[in-house]
Image (cartoon, helix red, strand yellow):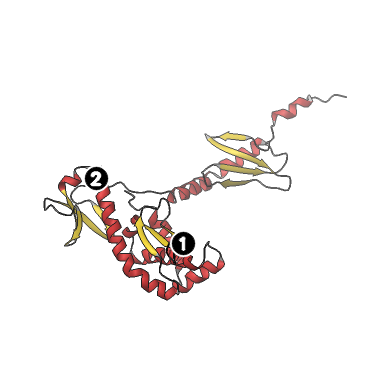
Amino acid sequence: MPGPFPPSDFDDRPLLVDGQVLVLDGQELRIVVTARRKRLGLTVERDGTLTLRAPLHCEVLRAEVFVRQSRAWIDSKLGLRDQHRPAHPVREFKDGERFRYLGREYRLLLTDEGGTPVRLAAGRLRMDRAVAGEPGQARRELIAWYRRAGLRWSKGRLQPWAARMEVSEPEVTVRDVGNRWGTYRSGGSASGQMAIHWAVFQLPAHLIDYVVAHELAHVRISGHGPDYWMLLRRAIPECEARKAELDDMGRRLWLG
Ligand SMILES: [Zn+2]
């Protein structure tokens, strides 16, 4: 005997389908349906997209209510994610602009003194006015200054760290190493080659030391396995805290 409602009426309460994308309040949710789940669960992925994990036979309506109730949580997660996004500043080459070196702030002073295009003297970073007038050239000259100053500084620092860590000193260069702060390659000279990003020299000395020690540890151990961290921790007991500080400050460095 047919009931009062035709069977198709069940379709009025649609269920979530595995793999579907549900759009709710302008936000896309990727749906993952799992048989062993009982409850709904939300994840904010690294790229900022949302995944909703649901049990079998879950009504879309139930999912919508759940997601709307989770709004504050979603917003806080998305906000946290923004804090981890790089926020590299833009700098202009004008009088008074602030640049950092070894953690200290120096104001730019445009001069007509001639000679070296960029130099640090009497507490000011001095740049030739004609150079400053050409942003591309100003940028190149300032980066070249960071490379020279950084190389001088690291040469004095490398030996004590290498001695402390009982590794031989690699050759060191200071340059742009892309999205890393330092690299180490074995080969070439007997104890390999280390490169440090020029932008690192804006950081306080204890963080540059961390980059130096990090790469020096690779002279003995490649990769970042447990014995790598054990070696680094012997040299810098608070290395995890320094790494976190580097990750945080590194996102806000001027990259040219
Ligand atoms: Zn490494």
Q: Is mark 2 within 8 Å of ligand 1?
A: no
Q: Secondary structure at mark 1?
A: loop
Residue 220 appears anywhere in the view:
yes
| Cα–Cα gap, marks 1 and 2 | 35 Å
- Residue 187, label in figure: 1
User: Quarter holding the N terminus?
Assistant: top right
Q: Residue at x 41, y 61 (%)?
A: 194
**Amino acid type, label 1:** Gly
Residue 233 at x, y percent in the picture: 48, 71
Give the mark nearest the N terminus, 1 or 2. Answer: 2
Q: Position of residue 242 (x, y in %)?
A: 42, 65
Q: Which mark is residue 81?
A: none
Q: Nearer the viewer, residue 184 or 41?
A: 184
Local SS, label 2: helix
Image location of residue 35, percent across then percent down: 73, 45
131 relative to 195, above or below? above
Query: Who is closer to the viewer here, 164 or 86?
Result: 164
Q: Left or right? Give the position of 51 relative to 146.
A: right
User: In this rendering, which labeled residue sits more in front, label 1 or label 2?
Assistant: 1
Figure quadrant of residue 63? top right
Identify residue for label 2: 137
- Circle 2: residue type: Gln
Q: Nearer the viewer, residue 38 or 168?
A: 168
Quick one: which residue is furthest to the right in this view? 1
Residue drawn at x 58%, y 41% as measured from the top left = 67
